[in-house]
Image: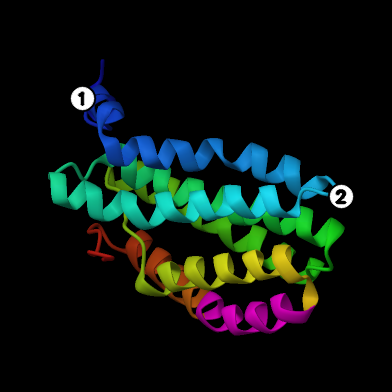
Amino acid sequence: MPARLRDAWDIREVTYPANWLTLARLLLVLPTIYYLRRSNGRWPALICMAVALGTDALDGPLARYRGEVSRLGKILDPIADKLMIDATAVVLAQRRGFPWWITGLLLFRDAGILLAALLIYRRHAQISTAQLSGKATTVALTVAVLLYTADGERSGKPALYIALLPFSLSFWQYGRMFVRVMRRQDVPDAS
């Protein structure tokens, strides 16, 4: 096996409790979407989203506390976050008045971030960590989709428009970082 592939991640990382939490969050996407699509599924969907939010709040601190910050976790965590928020946004746009134009921007931004991360990894064999604005965006969008699920546009729309502030900043920062990294041979510490 080539060294670059072998060094990508260690199979033992699958046994880390923090990565179990991230995998659980990934698995929660399907029941969340299932319940959101049902006319009487708002509360079960909210429970799934709340559990997913709990795993997101715990996985990073647990990994740091146990000294098990891993490449697998650095890859899975943002994918789990983006998949939960993006899939939820699509269903909420279909069912609860979540604006399609924001859903499109969100999908475009997240696809761009994942594609840029893959290009950076191919070029530098390193994983960039999230920007602070990206983490703020995840929190703000999570609150917005929770409110849209619970209360529709009445409380969801103001939260969503507030979430556009860190969203716009992260869009700009990730784009700037990508251009800078691709022009140079080094990878900045994005934490």
Position of 80 relative to 95 (above/below): above
Residue 67 appears left or right of 44: left
Look at the picture and state if 90 lies above or below 163. above
Which amino acid is tagged 2? Ser
Q: Nearer the viewer, residue 60 or 189?
A: 60
The residue under the point 18% across, 52% down is 64
Is residue 96 at least partly visible in the picture?
A: yes
Q: Residue at x 83, y 49 (%)?
A: 40
Q: Residue at x 37, y 59 (%)?
A: 182
Q: Callout 2: few (<14), some (14-19), or many (20+) C-alpha neighbours within 10 Å?
A: few
Q: Position of residue 65 (x, y in %)?
A: 15, 51
Q: Which mark is residue 39?
A: 2
Which residue in the rendered view is the most extreme toward the top?
1
Residue 97 vertical position relative to residue 43 in the rendered view, above or below: below
Number of numbered labels in the structure image? 2
Per the rendered image, the range of residues in magenta is 154-168
Which one is closest to the eye, mark 1 or mark 2? 2
Q: Quadrant of residue 152?
A: bottom right
Residue 11 placement (x, y as % from top left): 26, 23
Residue at the spot x=56%, y=40% of the render?
28
Q: Would you name the residue on which mark 1 appears?
A: 3
Q: Nearer the viewer, residue 32 or 8?
A: 32
Quadrant containing the C terminus in the rendered view: bottom left
- Residue 180: say if magenta: no
Alpha carbon distance from label 1 to label 2 = 51 Å
